[in-house]
Image (cartoon, rainbow, N blue to C red):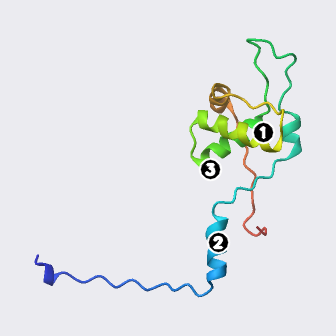
């Protein structure tokens, strides 16, 4: 088929920004990372006794699920997720123990994920 016989595609509509202040604020807000962490997740994190060599810490399912959710959202490998959690913990919750990447990997295999149900008629 010859080039001049092909059907021409429709031209794209030109989008014009009318409110630059709002548009700019929206672009800036793309980089905003805001997290609400329930205190019950943090209080149940470490149930282990003394931290001796070879003794694993016990972390709650909610804490593991929260970290694995962050892994999915930010598309991080497990080692980068551990570093991310350590940096967030250092800023907001100093002294809070963070599971290492092998613990996250092992617990992800057996974790029963419970997602909250949101009804379609419920407000966002």
Decide: is 93 above or below 122. above
Residue 42 position by quadrant:
top right
Decide: is 31 above or below 19. above
* x, y percent for residue 14: 44, 86
Q: Foreground: 51 or 113?
A: 51
The residue that mark 1 highlights is 90
* Labels 2 and 3: the sequence-earlier one: 2
Foreground tag (2 vs 3):
2
* x, y percent for residue 114: 73, 44
* Labels 1 and 2: the sequence-earlier one: 2
Graded by Cα atoms within 10 Å as few (under 14), some (14 to 19) or many (20 or more), the crowding at tag 3 reads: few
Foreground tag (1 vs 2):
1
How far apart are the alpha carbons under marks 1 and 2?
Answer: 28 Å
Graded by Cα atoms within 10 Å as few (under 14), some (14 to 19) or many (20 or more), the crowding at tag 2 reads: few
The secondary element bearing badge 1 is classed as helix
Decide: is 27 above or below 64. below
Q: Quadrant of the C terminus?
A: bottom right
From the viewer's perspective, tell me whether residue 7 is left or right of residue 17.
left
* x, y percent for residue 100: 68, 28
């Amino acid at each position: 088929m010859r080039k001049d016989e092909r059907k021409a595609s429709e031209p794209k509509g030109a989008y014009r920004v009318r409110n630059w202040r709002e548009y700019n604020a929206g672009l800036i807000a793309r980089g905003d990372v805001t997290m609400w962490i329930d205190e019950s997740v943090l209080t149940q994190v470490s149930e282990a006794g003394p931290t001796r060599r070879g003794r694993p810490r016990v972390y709650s399912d909610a804490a593991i699920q929260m970290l694995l959710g962050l892994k999915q959202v930010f598309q991080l490998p497990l080692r980068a997720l551990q570093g991310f959690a350590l940096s967030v913990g250092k800023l907001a919750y100093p002294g809070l123990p963070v599971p290492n990447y092998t613990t996250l990997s092992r617990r992800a295999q057996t974790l029963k994920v419970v997602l909250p149900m949101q009804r379609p008629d419920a407000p966002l």
